[in-house]
Image (cartoon, helix red, strand yellow):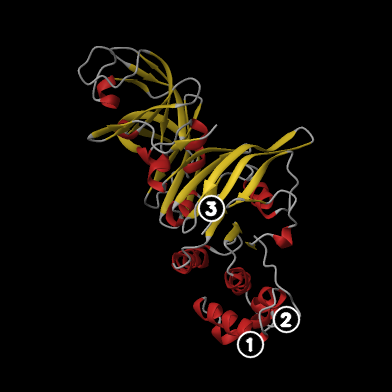
Amino acid sequence: MSSLTLQNLSLGVDDETWLEGVSLHLEPGALYTLLGRTGSGKTTLIRAIAGLETLDEGSVYYGDRCWDGLAPWKRPVAMVYQQFINYPHLSVLDNVAFPLRRAGVPRNDARDRAQGTLQKLGLGSMLNRRPGELSGGQQQRVAIARALTKEAPVLLMDEPLVNLDYKLREQMREELVELLADRQSTIVIYASTEPAEALQMSSRVLVMDEGRVVQEGAPRQVYGAPCSIAAARVVNDPPLNVLAMSLDRDAAEIESLGYFSPETIFGARPDGHPDDPGLKPGQYYVGIRAGDLALSDTGRPAEVTLTEVSGSETITHLNMAGTHLVMHERAVIKHRTGSHIHITPRLSTVFVFNRDGELVHVAHPGRRQTGEGHRHG
């Protein structure tokens, strides 16, 4: 089994940077999720691996074989796209068997392998239908089955579930994880804009921002200690609240939220305390998750500017003394737009970043830790 190595992949188009110095070493048997906003470089990176983009510099190696200049159809890669790309004139079975037939696999063997994959994906009763007779979710299952049946050592999946409804997306995530668990010789690279999807499915999360991989690590590490403000904003949904903080020995002043004792955040005072958190008095940023803002009779007043109810959860946008905040409540609470509520932050779980946006402290109840996961760049 060979690994996939990306060496300093860079690509610019006009005045825009699409990829900047991406270097990674990817091992078989793992599911790597490229997590980033739209435009962060995820699709470009996948296309570069597949040979569909011409790089300005950098190389792709599979084992000791360099893929530079190797045509896309000669690379041992299977791809699944956002859109349901199937051959409309072929049956479901022949759609899935097609890449095997093209590779010279005998017709009966190809159809047997295709049928086995389709059975696992719940399409065993639809072998003779045409794609146009299927729902969107079923069509995407066909596209996924075709990629899996090819059994390529590198599987690239570019937001394959994004066009499915929420319920089907949840179901497909679970099915994919189960199907891919048996493929210990396969390197799976999966692009997503959704933190929940990346954290649920991945062996490793690769956080992308502005064409760079800014952090790599296990899901728990990346979520629990994002290495920078940029990474923290990518891995948090609803959005992370990032506020300026001025710290001295006796007080931490957080933008719009007021003054707090340093012990509330760090369990210690800066400088000289036996449990010194390692921060000197100065200027910082704090990151407060939306779920760590709570209603409180004694909290600071804030004006409700928007309320979004999603299932059994409520996302409330607030204006507090000119600062925009987002609060996440695990209940349906329809705060009236224009009304005023009082909120208090839970400071025992904040992130602290320096003025360059780098993580310098993670506050967790009962324990202290600093940045986990590997930082890139």
Q: Do the residues labelled 3 and 2 touch (CB within 8 Å)?
A: no
Q: How crowded is mark 1: few (under 14 residues within 10 Å), some or many (20 or more)?
A: few
Tell me the number on the disc at residue 108. Answer: 1
Q: In the image, is residue 214 above or below residue 285?
A: below
Tell me the element at label 1. helix
Residue 203 in the image: x percent, y percent?
44, 53
Q: Which amino acid does label 1 sit on?
A: Asn
Q: Which residue lies furthest to the left in this view?
A: 274
Q: How crowded is mark 2: few (under 14 residues within 10 Å), some or many (20 or more)?
A: some
Residue 350 in the image: x percent, y percent?
36, 32
Tell me the element at label 3. loop
Mark in front: 1 vs 3: 3
Q: In which quarter of the image is the C terminus?
A: top right
Write down the residue under mark 2.
Answer: 90
Question: Separation of disc 1 and disc 3 at Cα?
Answer: 32 Å
Tell me the number on the disc at residue 3. Answer: 3
Q: In the image, is residue 297 above or below residue 170?
A: above
- Residue 243 visible? The answer is yes
Q: What residue type is labelled 2?
A: Leu
Mark in front: 3 vs 2: 3
Horizontal side of 190 relative to 100 (left or right) equals left
Q: Which residue lies furthest to the front in this view?
A: 64
Q: Are marks 2 and 1 in contact (CB under 8 Å)?
A: no
Q: Which amino acid does label 3 sit on?
A: Ser
Q: Residues within 10 Å of mark 3 (few under 14, many from 20)?
A: some
Q: Which of marks 3 and 2 is nearer the N terminus?
A: 3
